[in-house]
Amino acid sequence: MTSYFKTALLLAALTAIFMTGGFLLAGQSGMLIALALAAAMNLFAWWNSGSTVLRYYKAKEVDSSHSLHRIVSGLAGNSGLPVPKVYLIENPQPNAFATGRGPSNASVAATTGLLKLMNEREVAGVMAHELAHVKNRDTLIMTITATFAGAISMLANFALFFGGNRNSGLGIVGSIAMMILAPMAAMLVQMAISRTREYDADRGGAEICGNPDWLADALEKLEAGSQRIDNQAAENNPATAHMFIINPLHTHQRDKLFSTHPNTANRVAKLREMSGNSITSSVVTPAAPQGPWSPRKQTESGRGSVPGSGSRRGPWSRK
């Protein structure tokens, strides 16, 4: 099944959910209006959803002089991908995401909190994970889902104010069903998309960066940081939560059923298995890289070199 066919199925499913919400809210006329809106959103999401998410988080593009860009460029070379646009988000929570229709117009973004918390090896692991999403062509599906999930939740909010419309096929029952089922449907779609894709991107990211432990170490830090530090922008727009490498919302601690991400401990365990290192401690010395970086230079600590980092000691030196 090609990625385009999967995307078409997703669009069809989300459109059907949206139309059902319109029918529950305002009967046949509501369904037709929802269909028209869904068609418009399909076009918008295809062409603009990636840039919209970047604008929402006030992401600023960085050039090739920035260390984050140099790391991403090196990783893109390893994976055979065009170098994506690289963005920085002013946000204290450590996190990152990728967006765009495909490899030729992809963008990756990391928060300032991530750069502050991670060393170069861990940042390389995180960005390799995002590039794996790009390579797997997950980014279009993830951004489209964010657009529709937000719209479905918006329909549920409308039901609060316009419930009991006499044109609705089910009256007040339909409005109540809409308020309950629409957000649930949106979350279930997000959950189904995100959980399997995160595991695939973890595996692909480990292959791109050449050392599964780098990403495993990063995930442990990301989990701790996301639970401790708020991401208010994500809390205000939870429909984009599934795009991040780690769930940016604190609400997932209270509602595991609708978590958009797989359990971090399970992700780390799978990465440790890839490296042949089954330790569960968060303090791990990664093995020498076995992946595609060439030449495979080693640092003094034996942990391997990060592409694009050169001989720089500090992870974010601009010179």
Image (spheres, rainbow, N blue to C red):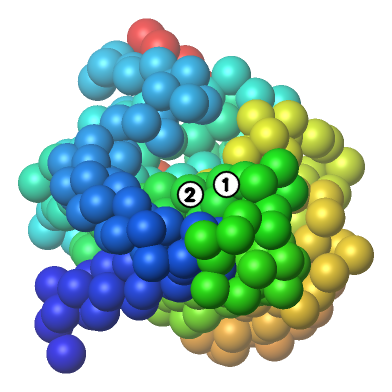
The answer to which of 88 and 173 lies nearer the viewer is 173
Type of amino acid under label 1: Met
Check if mark 1's residue and mark 2's residue have beta carbons within 8 Å: yes
Seen in the picture, residue 220 relative to 86 is either above or below; the reply is: below
Residue 154 circle label: 1
Q: Residue 157: x percent and y percent? A: 66, 47
Type of amino acid under label 2: Ala
- Which residue sits at x=65%, y=30%? 233
Seen in the picture, residue 207 relative to 244 is either above or below; the reply is: below
Q: Residue 151: x percent and y percent? A: 48, 49
Q: Residue 287: x percent and y percent? A: 55, 70
- Residue for badge 2: 151
Q: Residue furthest front?
A: 166
Residue 3 circle label: none
The answer to which of 101 and 12 lies nearer the viewer is 12
Quarter of the view holding residue 164: bottom right
Give the quadrant of the N terminus.
Answer: bottom left
